[in-house]
Image (cartoon, grey):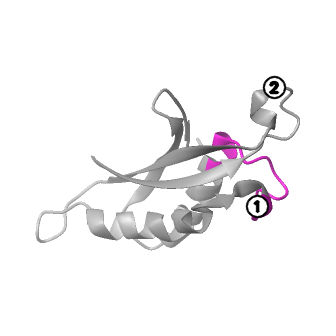
Amino acid sequence: MYKISVEQHFDAAHALRGYKGKCEALHGHRFNVVAKIEASGLNDIGLAYDFVELKARLAEIVERFDHTNLNDIPPFDKINPSSENIASTVYKKLKSRLAGEKVSLAAVEVWESPQTGVSYSPE
C-alpha cells in the first residue's frame, strides 16, 4: 500500500461559538491542511498518484477559506469553525473529488499551529 500526502495552507479568522474562553473571540491562524490518500498499485510510469493533481484538488477546496472570517461562510455559518469541523468538511469535499480514482482518501489533518492539530477519517 502506498500512502501519499500533500499539504496546503490558508490564513483565516474564526471565533468558536460557546467556547467560554479566549478562543470565543475572533482570532486568526495559518491553517495547514494535509490530505492523505492510499493506493494499492502504481500506474504505468511508476506513480501511485500525481502529487500535483492531488495538491490542486485540495487547493480548490481550501482556497475559498483563505483570508476570510470562517464564521461567515458555509458551512461554518451554521457549525462551529473548529479544526475538527474544518477537517471533516475538507474530507467530504475531497472524497467526492476523488470519486472514480484508483485511490482512497485515508485522512485529512488540520493544524492551526505547529503544536495543535486534528486528523479526521470516517472510520
As for residue 47 lying within the magenta part, the answer is no
**Residue that badge 1 annotates:** 75
Say whether residue 3 is left or right of residue 28.
Answer: left
Q: In which quarter of the image is residue 51?
A: bottom left
Q: Where is residue 79 in the image (x, y as percent from the top left)?
A: 81, 51
The rendered magenta stretch, by its main secondary structure, is classed as: loop
Q: Magenta segment, which residues?
A: 72-86
Q: Where is residue 53 in the image (x, y as percent from the top left)?
A: 33, 70
Q: Three-letter amino acid code at disc 2?
A: Gly
Q: In 3D space, how far apart are the residues under numbered discs 2 and 1 (Cα atoms)? A: 23 Å
Q: Is mark 2 on a helix, strand or loop?
A: loop
Say whether residue 102 is left or right of residue 19.
Answer: left
Q: Which of 2 and 23 is in front in this view?
A: 23
Q: Nearer the viewer, residue 40 or 17?
A: 17
Q: Which of 102 and 50 is in front in this view?
A: 50
Q: Position of residue 123 (x, y in %)?
A: 58, 41
Q: Which residue is drawn at 79% across and 38% down?
A: 25
Q: Residue at x 58, y 43 (%)?
A: 29
- Crowd class of label 1 (few under 14; some 14 to 19; many from 20; radius 10 Å): some
- Residue at far left of view: 45
Residue 102 appears in the figure:
no
Earlier along the polypeptide chain: callout 2 or callout 1?
Answer: 2
How many labels were placed on the picture? 2
Numbered circle sitting on residue 21? 2
